[in-house]
Amino acid sequence: MCHQRGTTTALETSPERSQTQAPWHRDPENPRNLSKSSLTTPGHTRGCLSVLVGDQAIVGDLVSGKLGRPRAPSMPLMLEDPDAWAKSVRLLLDRGARRFHPAHGGPFDADRVAKLL
């Protein structure tokens, strides 16, 4: 059963269910009910952001593949603040990131990224 914006089902409009949704309801914007959050992750630059979707971290340039070895994680070539970078990587690991998806190279398992710290 699909739920589309602007439509209701009989179950959702019945008096006994007027304030609740069916237990199988899925948000069309998040059909797998994954937790997601954006996090400020400075280090490469001050303005870096990462997105954590479930246990997957989309990290842009926070982590990258090594030159000539894109499947091996490394610190980015340009690192504005090494201490902030380490805190940002640690934040993602502490928030449950199991896989890092960088802009260049990867993806990388969290245990391989943790070895960079």
Image: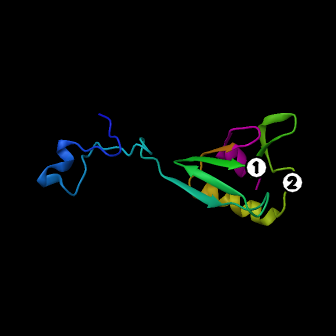
User: In this rendering, would 33 be left or right of 88?
Assistant: left
Q: Residue at x 79, y 66 (%)?
A: 83
Q: Amino acid at mark 1?
A: Asp
Image location (x, y in percent) of residue 18: 18, 55
Q: Is 109 covered by the magenta stretch?
A: yes
Q: Is residue 19 above or below residue 74?
A: below
Residue 43, quarter of picture: bottom right
User: In this rendering, would 40 be left or right of 22?
Assistant: right
Highlighted range, magenta:
102-117
Task: Measure the alpha-carbon separation of dots 1 and 2.
Answer: 9 Å
Q: Is residue 115 above or below residue 65?
A: below
Q: Is 112 covered by the magenta stretch?
A: yes
Q: Which mark is residue 112?
A: none
Tell me the quadrant of the picture where the C terminus can be found: bottom right
Q: Residue at x 17, y 52 (%)?
A: 17
C-beta proximity under 8 Å, tags 1 and 2:
yes
Q: Which mark is residue 61?
A: 1
Q: Is residue 20 above or below residue 104?
A: below
**Residue at the far left in the pictured view:** 15
Q: Between 78 and 20, which is closer to the camera in this rendering?
A: 20
Residue highlighted by disc 2: 78
Q: Between 37 and 86, which is closer to the camera in this rendering?
A: 37
Q: Amino acid at mark 2?
A: Met
Q: Secondary structure at mark 1?
A: loop
Between discs 1 and 2, the one toward the N terminus: 1
Q: Residue at x 68, y 38 (%)?
A: 107
